[in-house]
Amino acid sequence: MVENNFDILGIVEGSNEREIRYAFRRLALQYHSDRGGENEQFIKIKQAYEDLKIGKKYPETDIEKRNNSRVYSDETEADVKRKNQILGQQLSKEMETAENWAATLNKSNLTATRLFGSKTLGEIELERKVNGSLSIKGNFMAGSITYDGPITMQGSITSPSWTKEFQTKIHLTSGDFKFVNPLENKYKIENGAEIVVDSGNIVIGNVYGRKFRVEDPDGKVGVFQIQEHRTHISSPNGKIIAENLIDTVSIDADSVIILNAEDDVRISAREVLFYGGKFTYDSIIELKQGGTIRFFEKFSIQGLSGDAIIKLENGKKIRLFDLKTKKIRDLDDKFMPNKENFTKDATLIGNGFTITYDMLDNLSKNISKQKNGWKSKFGF
């Protein structure tokens, strides 16, 4: 029988985090070379501990160690990019194999555990469970996988920065996608990865995109192009619960619950709930018909940038600047049941506030009337 990482640490399978940490410390004191122990055994124990921290049950075999020992480094960026692209291609093939493996188990309603990937770009453990869910443990770094059922994940998700050809994409045709304790474990999704859930919910941690300058391909001095790796999270019929959305991120769901959205974040939803105080820098909310936006921040909306935009499903656009100025005073009581939440200058303050689709639609009409009034006054 193959010795697993629990066996190496001398604990029973399923031990909790505290028991795993205690076992490692006990064995480290015994086998560390500084205390006269065997260095090879200590390395084995340390690796087992690191593996169990990300939920990996079995250590890698000698064949896997040999296959994963290829580390590319070169003086030129072109060579590094070329060789890393080869590894990305290999990992994408691994994910294709993983997808077929999981689909076969799903069709036969069987359970199994298997390792995929490489140490260089990321090794992950997949387990198809009795209830039909797929468990992914480890960091997902390239390639795509589609699964008909829920997925639980322990690890972060990224996508290759050197090419979009092997973009990371996880697609669920049914069920929920969930990180295991994402805030506590600090799991994140970044760099242009994509998660699509057709008919379930998504529970994740921080989400980042990436936008950067590259030199002009024609070699023009001082001329740059902007490359974008936008991270997409989509659950059109369900709910997305996330922490912070930062720098080139798109979210699409029926309901979105987040802390903050900063720097070119696009949110499309019927209901948006903010539990932080920031919605800033060229960010857009596309609010669906009959929808609401609720801010739970207790003090003010100073973290809401005036250049952020709320776009209605009927095509109308309202800047947050218009919600933070006197223009909002022209709203009818019908659309502002909580006028006491506004100061004399109509700056939004208090213990949070709710903005409805109808309220914004009515506000856009009032702003349009004001602009037309000024045009008539000056003879435009």
Image: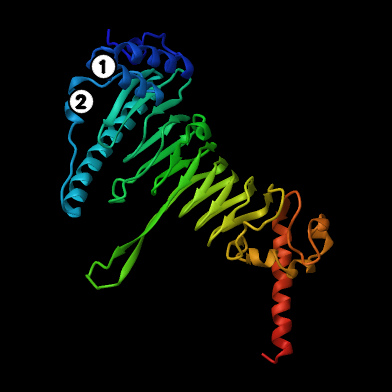
**Crowding near the residue tagged with mark 1, few <14, some 14–19, many ≥20 C-alpha atoms within 10 Å:** some
User: What residue does disc 1 label?
Assistant: 33
Q: Position of residue 373 (x, y in %)?
A: 74, 82
User: What residue does disc 2 label?
Assistant: 65
**Sequence order check: which comes first, mark 1 or mark 2?**
1
Query: CA separation, marks 1 and 2?
Result: 23 Å
Element assignment for label 2: helix
As drawn, 312 above or below 231: below
* Residue 149 makes an appearance in the image: no
Residue farthest along the bottom direction in this orientation: 379
Looking at this view, is 200 or 340 the one in front? 340
Amino acid at the residue labelled 1: Ser
Which quadrant of the figure contains the N terminus? top left
* Residue 280 makes an appearance in the image: yes
Element assignment for label 1: helix
Which quadrant of the figure contains the C terminus? bottom right
Relative side of 158 to 305, left or right: left
Foreground mark, 1 or 2?
Answer: 1
Amino acid at the residue labelled 2: Lys
Q: Residue at x 68, y 50 (%)?
A: 295
Q: Residue at x 47, y 36 (%)?
A: 186
Q: Position of residue 170 (x, y in %)?
A: 40, 39
Q: Position of residue 116 (x, y in %)?
A: 29, 29
Q: Residue at x 32, y 10 (%)?
A: 30
As drawn, 170 above or below 230: above
Residue 94's tag is none
Quarter of the figure with residue 4: top left
**Crowding near the residue tagged with mark 2, few <14, some 14–19, many ≥20 C-alpha atoms within 10 Å:** few
Q: Residue at x 57, y 49 (%)?
A: 260
Q: Position of residue 204 (x, y in %)?
A: 51, 38
Q: How many marks?
A: 2
As drawn, 58 above or below 334: above
